[in-house]
Image (cartoon, rainbow, N blue to C red):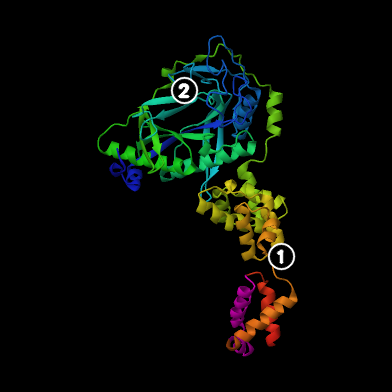
Amino acid sequence: MTVIDLESYEDALATYDPVMGLEVHVELGTKTKMFCGCSTELKQDANSQTCPVCLGLPGALPVVNEIGVESAIKIGLALNCEIAEWCRFARKNYFYPDMPKNFQTSQYDEPIAYDGYLDVQLEDGEIFRVQIERAHMEEDTGKSTHVGGATGRIHGASHSLLDYNRAGIPLIEIVTKPIEGAGARAPEVAKAYVAELRELIKALGVSEARMEMGQMRCDVNLSLRPNGTETFGTRSETKNVNSLRSVERAARFEIQRHAAVLNSGGTIVQETRHFHEEDGSTTAGRIKDNAEDYRYFPEPDLVPVAPSRDWVEELRKGLPELPRLRRKRLKEEWGVNEHDMQSILNAGAVDLIVATTDAGAPSDQARKWWMGELARNANETGRSLDELPVTPAQVARVAELVAAGDLNDKLARQVLEGVLAGEGDPDTVVEKRGLKVVSDEGALSTAVDEAIAGNAAIADKIRGGKVAAAGALVGAVMKATRGQADAARVRELILEKLGVEG
């Protein structure tokens, strides 16, 4: 199946109703792994952060990471879930080439959190409730690197390298109930849900949830059923989708692909699929197993987890303000409309703007610089806003210099350019580049006199009542001062010298 075989999206939705299930894996930000004391620090030498437990050596006994359990409870509470009074781990038996013990320690029929929901806001402001089936604890696998092929995948590779540093890192898997009723907006709902979940995870402080680094990834399960029917169709599962845009594209592609297969008389195969960033397509992976194929059984080497109600309630009281409620409050405090707030959210600028206001900048100035000059730089350099080499405190200092009259907007943009280029903090850049506004009245007066003398015809127009023509003289002064004059004060001086009321 290739892109040209797809049914049009509109025709697919005219015939079929999409049903989704989203499984999101979140790597927890603990210092050690889920069942051993090995470090979870990133980018270390291959296989340097391993021990008999995470390598699955005979006789090695696991111990549960308490912070991992605490993080799972926090996530469950934030998702409006019930927290189990008693639960246990299970062995999920499956051939994992990058999990040396050949089973994953997970949870099956006894998850730590279950039966919750998350309300997500779509771009037009509509609230869509996604029901949560469960959130359970498990461990990550290692990393396989396939060498010698053209695609980086196992097919065509000459050999594979295995790094077990990631094996055993704590994961929380959050599984939705079937998402029905979204219709043509199903891909948008999928994207909005993962976006809201990411913000929630970050707010809880349990993970950085950076999708591009694999700290959060989504499996998109999708099936189609004829409109007006209730029975679910056969699902496909697009694995490890690692960006919000890709979640939306994967859901949309699978709707079109399923419809094309069904309309041609074919049968949907229950399988995993790989997502391809370059064109938004998916390709077949392996036949998808059912739960019974994994031969789950209780993990004999771990005691059950029984969080006390007092502990659960203590954690509930300590939850931060949840993202949607926080955005609603900030929207009112900042006085922005829904469209602008959505743009700020989409740009990943909410926390940066808050931090900039906390550093002393007015909220309108914080929004102006992050959503203007800095967003432009991020787009041009292919980075996210939080990857730019500028801090909220530095942006607040630029805003302060503008408010004090030491910089105008043009100079402020040059200062930010210097900060982004690594030339130092704003004050250092101002000093090195000589960017301070010319505020010396004598120097300004001289520059205005020269502009009037050099543009006599324009000066006569202004004297004749065409005050708008003063803009040309202002421009001449700004050019002469390399943009370092206060344009408003320059205009005042021009009109004063020409004897014209402003």
* Magenta residue check for 459: yes
- Name the residue nearer the viewer: 468 or 272: 468
| Whole-percent x, y for residue 79 in the image | 59, 34
The tag on residue 372 is: none
Q: Is residue 445 above or below residue 236?
A: below
Q: Is residue 401 left or right of residue 88?
A: right
Image point (41%, 25%), residue name: 160
**Residue annotated with mark 2:** 98
Image point (54%, 52%), residue name: 378
Q: CA distance from mark 1 to mark 2?
A: 59 Å
Image point (70%, 28%), residue name: 313
* Magenta residue check for 108: no
User: What span is in magenta?
Assistant: 458-482
Quarter of the image holding residue 237? Answer: top left
Quarter of the image holding residue 71? Answer: top right
**Residue annotated with mark 1:** 406
Q: Can residue 362 be seen in the rendering of this structure? A: no
Which is the main secondary structure of the residues drawn in magenta? helix
Q: Is residue 92 left or right of residue 203?
A: left
Q: Residue furthest front?
A: 432
| Whole-percent x, y for residue 134 in the image | 54, 28
Q: Amino acid at mark 1?
A: Asp
Q: Is residue 277 above or below residue 174?
A: below
Say which element carries label 1: loop
Q: Amino acid at mark 2?
A: Asp
Q: Can residue 29 be seen in the rendering of this structure? A: yes
Q: Residue furthest top?
A: 59
| Whole-percent x, y for residue 352 in the image | 63, 49
| Whole-percent x, y for residue 306 in the image | 64, 19
